[in-house]
Image (cartoon, rainbow, N blue to C red):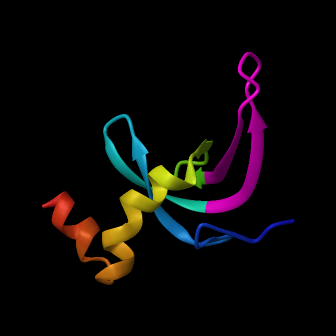
Amino acid sequence: MINEHWGFRVGERITVPGLWGEQMGTVIDFATMQGRNAGRVAHVVVYRLDDGRVSSDTPERLFRLNRNHRAYGGMGTQARAA
């Protein structure tokens, strides 16, 4: 099992996109998915939201969301919420 991808680690708390803004989630796994038509391979980060739902997203998108949080020790998330 891969335990790190794009700098994300299993068990790490991350900011994830949600329908009503950003939410917090915990990385639980990494997966590779293949599209039915084009046959493209996509790598995804699988995470569990605080309310128990499980979802996934591309590591590139999650990296952009969490870049400020990592660089400034959490100020990015606080600044967006204010």
| Outermost bottom residue | 73
- State how many labels appear: 0
Choose between 34 and 46: the one closer to the eye.
34
Query: Residue 52: horizontal and vertical position, in percent?
Result: 61, 48
Residue, x 61% and y 42% (percent of image)?
55
Query: Residue 15: horizontal and vertical position, in percent?
Result: 42, 59
Query: Residue 76: horizontal and vertical position, in percent?
Result: 25, 70
- The quarter of the image holding the C terminus is bottom left
Q: Would residue 50 be found to the left or right of residue 40 on screen?
A: left
Residue, x 34% and y 80% (percent of image)?
71
Query: Residue 68: horizontal and vertical position, in percent?
Result: 30, 71
Q: Is residue 31 above or below residue 71?
A: above
Residue, x 40% and y 52% (percent of image)?
23
Q: Is residue 37 above or below residue 68?
A: above
- The quarter of the image holding the N terminus is bottom right
| Outermost left residue | 82
**Residue bounds of the magenta highlight:** 27-47
Residue, x 34% and y 50% (percent of image)?
22
Q: Is residue 13 above or below residue 36?
A: below
- Tell me if residue 46 is in the magenta stretch: yes
**Toward which corner of the image does residue 6 lie, by quadrant?**
bottom right
Majority secondary structure of the magenta segment?
A: strand
| Outermost top residue | 37
**Toward which corner of the image does residue 77 lie, by quadrant?**
bottom left
- Tell me if residue 39 is in the magenta stretch: yes
Q: Would residue 36 be found to the left or right of residue 66 on screen?
A: right
